[in-house]
């Protein structure tokens, strides 16, 4: 949800490789280009954006298209506008990307091609943090927010070395491996002719990751492991929390552009501390 300037710059430059120009609007923090076909009067993403991995909602009032300079500068959040999304969808050949293979013949897992349909009836969205061992952290890794959702989807990550496991007692029911790199995107490796990077080139102190794995019935705990070492674990609650919406008390139609109050109560028979995510749809989930 807070990727930092380097991530925005990487996406910005990747889009340039597909011949997308700057937004070229007055509020673009200097991201000018008279050849731009960006159709909007401002660099706003124009409509609400949604990150399906983290659940974050991007407000167009303070979020710019990534082809504006404002996200990398920190004055606006960054996401993708309908124009940029449609342009890139037409440029990227998903079939060709899925067929791309590494030198060893292993399929390359790229972007949207990571999202897979599974036969599971439910899936687990996992947010986690791995800390750079070079910084001597108090913990090597932590499990953060996790959401069990209906439907069989998976979003695996490339690499090995770490894994998220679903367990029943000491029995491992499933294990999804992934790798981590702490190298800064601004590390020029000291090559001759490289410009001085605009941001610190030191390794990152931590890596924040998200993945989706199929849920396995019977799991009693979720573990983050490195090899055979458990870095963090969470017990699965025996009872699902109960949430009741108290306002609106009955189906209601809210006029567009108005501010409304949503209230609810929650309880957990296990006595656990509850956190909440509010999900909504403007078209009845279609």
Image (tube, rainbow, N blue to C red):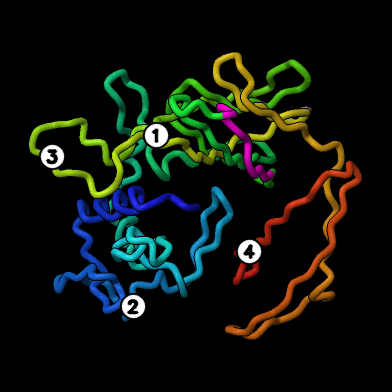
Residue 200 in view here: yes
Q: Which mark is residue 155?
A: none
- Which region is colored magenta? 138-147
**Residue mark closest to the camera, 4 vs 3:** 3
| Residue 104 among magenta residues | no
Q: Residue at x 62, y 84 (%)?
A: 258
What residue is shown with label 2?
A: 42
Q: Which residue is mark 1?
A: 109
Q: Is residue 245 above or below residue 232?
A: below
Pointer 1 with pointer 2, Cβ within 8 A: no
- Between discs 2 and 3, the one toward the N terminus: 2
Looking at the image, the residue that sits furthest to the left is 193
Closer to the eye: label 4 or 2: 2
Residue depicted at x 32% and y 21%: 105
Q: Is residue 200 left or right of residue 206?
A: left
Is disc 2 surrounded by few (<14), some (14 to 19) or many (20+) residues within 10 Å?
A: some
For marks 1 and 4 on the same chain, the one whose residue lies earlier in the sequence: 1
Mark 4 / mark 3, whichever is N-terminal = 3
Q: Position of residue 227 (x, y in %)?
A: 55, 16
Per the image, label 2 sits on a secondary structure element best described as: loop
**Secondary structure at numbered mark 3:** loop
Looking at the image, residue 183 lies above or below residue 81: above
Quick check: 164 above or below 255? above
Relative placement, left or right, of 73 versus 244 is left
> Is the residue under label 3 in contact with that under label 1 (CB below 8 Å)?
no
Q: Are marks 1 and 4 in contact (CB under 8 Å)?
A: no
Which tag, 1 or 3, sits closer to the chain's start?
1
Q: Nearer the viewer, mark 1 or mark 4?
A: 1
Describe the element under mark 1 as helix, strand or loop.
loop
User: Mark 4 and mark 3: span between their CA atoms?
Assistant: 49 Å
**Which residue carries the number 4 mark?**
285
| Classed neighbour count for the residue bearing mark 1: other residues with Cα under 10 Å, few (<14), some (14–19), many (≥20) | many
């Amino acid at each position: 949800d807070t990727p930092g300037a380097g991530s925005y710059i990487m996406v910005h430059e990747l889009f340039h490789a597909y011949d997308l120009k700057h937004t070229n609007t007055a509020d673009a923090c200097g991201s000018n280009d008279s050849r731009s076909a960006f159709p909007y009067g401002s660099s706003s993403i124009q409509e609400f954006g949604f990150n399906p991995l983290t659940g974050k909602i991007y407000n167009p009032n303070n979020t710019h298209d990534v082809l504006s300079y404002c996200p990398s500068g920190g004055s606006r959040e960054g996401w993708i506008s309908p124009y940029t999304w449609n342009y890139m969808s037409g440029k990227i050949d998903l079939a060709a990307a899925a067929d791309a293979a590494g030198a060893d013949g292993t399929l390359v897992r790229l972007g949207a091609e990571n999202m897979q349909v599974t036969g599971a009836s439910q899936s687990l969205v996992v947010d986690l943090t791995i800390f750079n061992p070079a910084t001597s952290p108090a913990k090597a890794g932590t499990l953060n927010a996790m959401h069990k959702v209906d439907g069989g989807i998976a979003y695996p990550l490339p690499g090995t070395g770490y894994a998220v496991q679903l367990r029943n007692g000491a029995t491992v029911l499933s294990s999804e491996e992934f790798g981590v790199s702490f190298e800064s995107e601004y590390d020029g490796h000291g090559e001759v002719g490289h410009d001085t990077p605009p941001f610190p080139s030191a390794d990152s102190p931590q890596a924040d990751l998200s993945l989706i794995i199929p849920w396995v019935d019977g799991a009693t705990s979720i573990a983050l492991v490195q090899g055979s070492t458990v870095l963090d674990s969470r017990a699965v609650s025996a009872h699902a929390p109960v949430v009741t919406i108290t306002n609106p008390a009955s189906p209601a139609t809210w006029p567009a552009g108005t501010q409304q109050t949503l209230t609810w109560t929650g309880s957990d028979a296990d006595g656990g501390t509850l956190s909440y995510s509010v999900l909504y749809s403007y078209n009845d989930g279609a």
